[in-house]
Amino acid sequence: MFEKLALLPLSNFIRNKSIQNFLFLAVIQSSNVLISIISMPLLIQSIGVDQFGLVNLALSVIILLNILVGFGYNLSAPREVAVNQNDKMALSHLVSNVFSAKAILAFIATLLILVGAFGFNLFQEYQLILVFSSLLLFSEATLPLWFFQGMEKMKLVSIANIFSKLLFLMGIVLFIHSPEQSKWVNFMMGFFGLSINLLLLVYIHSFLGIRFYRPEFSAIWKSWKDNLLLFFSNLASHISINGGLIILSFFSVAETLGMYSLAERVVMVLRLFPALIIQAIFPNASKLHKEDPGRFFSFLKKVYLRVLLTGAVIAAGAHFSAPWIIQVLSKSNLEESILYLKILAAVPFLACLNVGNITLLLVADLKELLFKASWMMCVYMLVVSTLLTSLMGGIGLCIGIISTEVIVFLICLVLLFRHKRELVRGFYA
């Protein structure tokens, strides 16, 4: 038996471009989570709990504005890169226009912050922190992850991401020592991210032969119109996935919020798995869908079955190890938080159910259907979760979040069947 296992083509498995994409995307996300966990106690000791909260509040505003800066390019641009991998001229124009478009959006987002802070006197408690945090918008604008994802060459960008996060961690240790320095925390994250991204752009130009042209404003305007539905889809998904804690804040005390927040953080990390799978297989799936639909459906079916199996293992592991996970993270036995985690542990598996549907929507460029599905999910989540939370508190919210994952799967399936029946038959047959 062991001899047969030794003969398995492990090297071919590792060389698979989709698997490499997934592994490097997982490295990027896990390094982000790890650095966040390490930096939390360092920042709390240096700037205090109050300033730490304001820094994170400013970061939440930036993350929301980063959806504007991204404007759906994280979904549309990898597909365009993938289908033009061997056309340097087309890639050069695409890269120039996408970076120019995202830079313009970063300037607009920064202007919104400045007008809000100094024109309307918003964000009073953390105005200066938020203004300094705006550099993160330009870090997002220059991040070439979508390019390397489409080229299926993720190794370099994953290493660069880890390096920028390590520089940020070093900056905290060396330069952040008092509450008055809290404004520099997010600024440093943006500075190191932007610096590394600019070096990656130099690499793209010098070693990959991609030229940078002046922005073609007609092409940029067209891409904005084409990506408008993707932008609103991303916005709706962000609200649906991250809006639970805000809903709970209207009905529960701070202690319950803390208990739920701890469980939610664990689940949101686990829920990255299906999202990473979609990002990893998207470039190859786009090419196969265009060149050979039969191979595309075969490829997607194999991936889907493995994703469902892995998702089930992740969900079961999170459910049964919930007491240990909460004990390690909180250094105490928080029964309420354990209960929330046990219920929410089903979320990663339920999210995996929709991997096939979302991939079909993306490779077929069905932005309108994705937009409808995202906002139907958002409306359902807000209405049902609010109602259940008002009646049952945190338990009701958990049930609302779980039911949302099931409903969005059904919504996507029905929309695909009504508008692109051949895709549903090809995949599910």
Image (cartoon, helix red, strand yellow):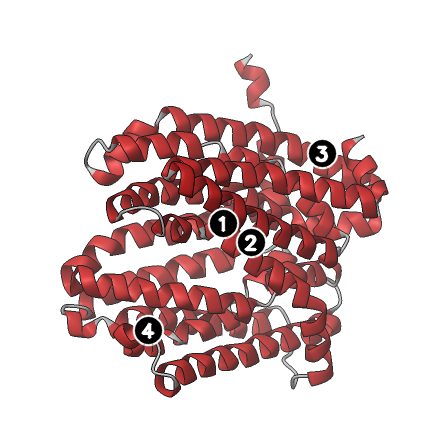
For discs 2 and 3, the disc positioned in front in the rendered view: 2
Q: Which residue is mark 2?
A: 237
Tell me the crowding category of disc 3: few under 14, some 14 to 19, or many 20 or more residues within 10 angstroms, Cα based.
some
Residue 393 point in image, percent of width and height: 37, 39
The numbered disc on residue 187 is: 4
Q: Which element carries disc 4, helix, strand or loop?
A: helix
Does the CB distance between marks 1 and 2 fall below 8 Å?
A: yes
Instruction: Look at 64% across and 77% down and name the residue there.
Output: 96
Identity, as a three-letter code, of the amino acid under mark 3: Lys
Q: Is residue 203 above or below residue 151?
A: below
- Pointer 4 or 3: first along the chain: 4
C-beta proximity under 8 Å, tags 4 and 1 = no
Disc 2, SS: helix
Q: Which residue is mark 1?
A: 241
Q: Position of residue 176 (x, y in %)?
A: 19, 68
Callout 1: 10 Å neighbours few (<14), some, many (20+)?
Answer: some
Q: Which residue is mark 3?
A: 301
First of labels 4, 2 by sequence position: 4
Question: Given this view, does label 1 or label 3 mark the residue nearer the observer?
Answer: 1
Q: Which kind of residue does numbered mark 2 sit on?
A: Ser
Q: Is residue 395 left or right of residue 359?
A: left
